[in-house]
Image (spheres, rainbow, N blue to C red):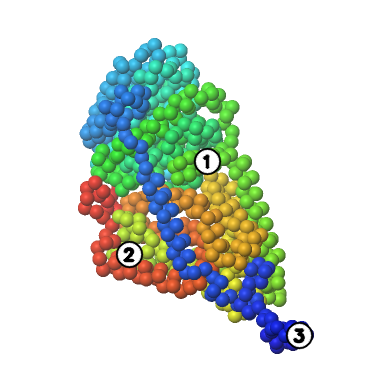
Amino acid sequence: MISSGSKSIRQRSGGTKIKSPPKDVYSSKLSSPRRSQPSSVLAPTYMFGLFVLVYLATYGFVMLVERQLPRPLTIQDEPRHPGRFIAERVYNHLVNLTSLGPRPVGSFENEVLAVNFLRKEINNVIQQSDPKVHQIRLDTQTVSGAFPLTFLDRMTNIYRNVQNVIVRVGPVVESAHSLLVNCHFDTVPDSPGASDDGSSCALMLELLRVIALSPTPLQNNIVFLFNGAEEAFLQASHGFITQHPWARNVRAFVNLEACGAGGREVLFQSGPKNPWLMEVYSASVPYPFASSLAQDVFQSGLIPGDTDFRIFRDFGNIPGLDFAWSKNGYVYHTRLDAVSQIPLASLQRTGDNILPLLLNLVNSKQLVAVHQYREGSLVYFDFIGLFIVTLSSTFTILVCLLTLGLVLLSVYINSRAAGEQLAHGSSYAGLLVRCAGFTLVNYVLCLGVNLAIAFTLTKMNRAMSWYGAHLWLVPLYIIPLLILSFSSILFFTHNYLAKFTRFKQSTHSSFYYNVITDSTLLLYSLIMMLLMFTYVGSVMVPLIWILSLSLFSILRSLHPSLSLNPVSSLLCFLLFSLVPYMLCSYLIYCVLLLIVPIMGRSGSGNHAEEVISFLTTTIFSLLFNLMTPCILFVRSPKKVLSSLGTIFFVSILLLVLTPLGFPYSGEVQYERPSPACG
């Protein structure tokens, strides 16, 4: 017989006293406490430090990988590496070209000196080549024309007497199919244009030499186009593709550009359609760096600028690949864009990638029958530069639907297990809706606070510290984001969400983690589905997070040992999140390398501090939304919040009271141009 107020059960036969379970224990179902959750069953606070160390180490590894470049080959190495691309020879070409000075369209340096330089170097290659193996022809085109700038308020772009230096390399028996390789040798005024786009011209001269001196004949033609008017809104490429007789046989193209000096060349546009181009790229290059996400962002217009890719695509109806350097964009379109800014290793890497790519493209069966391989598109990305992943759009959609099914399965399992823990009249679906609203409100709150920080820094004349060191983004905007997100989750679960459950005295970490995570997974699934039907190339970022953490959620639900042990849950979460976090860290680092210099040269009227604050808050909110609920498993979240708060306030003091946050450097090699430049 059990009395209503008894706290023990007496076993009359033997007189032993059996104590009832303490009130603060987990039940065997969904690892829930009956009333409250003691701190002894939560993870020690140092687990948060472990997370920070692992994620920082991962980001550091990504930075290290991004900086890896191959050893450049010199002319002395050539006898030991016959047929290889030689970076030193490219460097010498670049020195000679930039020594002419700035080369704006119409200038003597561009129309006479640069053209003569290119013709001289090309003729030297022709003299060394074997006419029994390769047929090489050189032409200089002077062309006039006009076309509408549909991407710039439909203005009409009229040009007269712009020049192209064109060389065609092909088999002795002439082929009717050509691959186009394009660069431009003109520059903006007052810039030597070492990276934009003198480096591509020098690279193409070396590519021409290696191919022309090869004893192996090509199956089709390669047309090297050195165009002399790109900075004046893509004029010379239009003149070639619409008026030159060799353009009629062009079946595909490779465009070489730059919006930075050195680093790794990124493939940021492919197509339209013609997935075979990406298939050849992935099978050819030893150092891949490509992203369909970058293509979606660039073609959406969020990144200012355009390339000759548009001209060949729109006026030639030709598919192609668009490459560009994006690192060290501080010197882009400034007097600092000199040869000294470009590492030999960057030249070697680009040459080692483009040379096999050109050879495999020009000798491919697809080039002679492009129309047969036109349909279809690919989602592609490289995994931290180690290898490239290409998926057909159809297969990607199937994976998205499968992932959505896993999310719904996770929600179903957790909702079934949560039935007895909900207060009368409450439903799991209702909690999911409330958590979704909380996620959106939390983002607005974080954005408002970070924009207020940015506005205050601007008024105090302490803006743009991140221009000289990206690390300042961490204490200024990322740590406040974490503080607010952690605090909001704790407040939301303790003071609001608990009203809809049977837990009246304290929160239950496992239950609330499931609710918040399921809600976030559903929100991200909605984003994934929208991207799937609009910008399918960008869908891989949410897809890999949703897939990994929905599997983790299902695993927790099916294995009570994980739910019962917060330490095991956190370690398992860390394991499942590591790959998507590494991929996102890689993308974020590459985005910062591109965006930060753009913000610096955008001018004071464009509110660079506020824009960076908005971008940082948005990007890291999307990254952290599935990670911040882990604070519910930590024994002492106040210690975490106080540590983060200390870092934030110390950083603000250092920024305000010391010159550490000054954005510019006096070192010429790493000089940062002022925001007015450019």
Left or right, 36 with respect to 300, comes to right
The amino acid at mark 1 is Val
Task: Specify few, some or many for label 1: CA neighbours under 10 Å numbering under 14, 14-19, or 20 or more.
Answer: some
x 28%, y 57%: residue: 663
Asked if 84 appears above or below 233 in the picture, the reply is above
In the rendered structure, the answer to whether residue 110 lies left or right of residue 219 reads left
Extreme-top residue of the structure: 132
Percent position of residue 191, x then y? 26, 41
Q: Which residue is mark 3?
A: 12
Task: Tell me the element at label 1.
Answer: strand
From the viewer's perspective, tell me whether residue 158 is left or right of residue 294: left
Q: Earlier in the sequence, mark 1 or mark 2?
A: 1
Quarter of the image where one finds residue 241: top left
Q: Is residue 543 left or right of residue 28?
A: left
Q: Amino acid at mark 2?
A: Thr
Tell me how far mark 3 sits from mark 1, CA to CA: 70 Å
Residue 458: which numbered mark, if any?
2
Relative to 303, residue 345 above or below? above
Q: Nearer the viewer, residue 266 or 46?
A: 46
The residue that disc 1 covers is: 389
